[in-house]
Amino acid sequence: MLHPGSVLAIWWNTTAFDVPWIRDQHARIAHHCGIPARSAECPDDGQAVRLAGLTGLRVPRRHIRWRRTVPLRTHLADIGSRSAFLVPEQTANRAFFTEERERLRAIFPDELVTETYVVDLLMAAPPAPGIGKGNATPVSSSESSHNLRAATASRAFAVRPTSFGAPRLSRRPPGPA
């Protein structure tokens, strides 16, 4: 339940398919693991609201690009931790990662990989008075900007304005599965 004046921030790190080496690596991983490559197209705002279960709330949406630089071994370990790598034979996985290491060394000779992500951020607020269920209502850019500054760290925060007008984040414990 959202308290009056609160918003719920939900976000996901998504693949930056516009970065050629990331797009190509994604296709290689999907092929190796025998799964279809994920579409580079992102759902439109209405679909995103529906998929997140936020229908009937006022939901501004933003895409925020960010990047980090990590050692090559960290990048490969992160990829290797994905459950899709549990299916192929371990011998095949070792060969894949040996080849992938060589491909990435050609792009990042210093073995520092710059990973780029796009955060898909939804900020849900209770519906405005007079708005019926099933309608996603845009929020003004000033209200949206205020709310965006408040959502900075995780996927499950409720944001409540304080008496000083600055938002306060309150971490919600994970609910039952």
Image: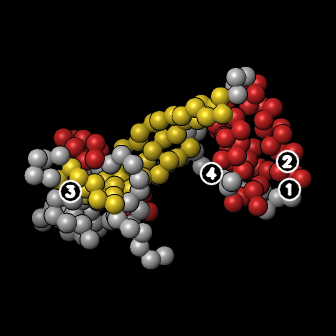
Dot 1: what SS? helix
User: Residue 157, located in which quarter of the rendered image?
Assistant: bottom left
Q: Is residue 102 visible?
A: yes
Distance of label 1 from label 2 (alpha carbons)? 6 Å
- Residue 77, given in percent of the width and then of the height, sits at 70, 46
**In the displayed structure image, the side of residue 117 where residue 133 appears, left or right:** left
Distance of label 4 from label 2 (alpha carbons)? 23 Å
The residue at the point 32 percent across, 48 percent down is: 151
**Mark seen at residue 94:** 2
The three-letter amino acid code for the residue at tag 1 is Gln
The colour scheme is secondary structure
**Mark seen at residue 90:** 1
N-terminal label among 4 and 2: 4
The three-letter amino acid code for the residue at tag 3 is Arg
> Do labels 3 and 4 touch, CB within 8 Å?
no
**In the displayed structure image, the side of residue 100 where residue 132 appears, left or right:** left
N-terminal label among 3 and 4: 4
Which residue lies under the disc numbered 3?
160
Which residue lies under the disc numbered 4?
38
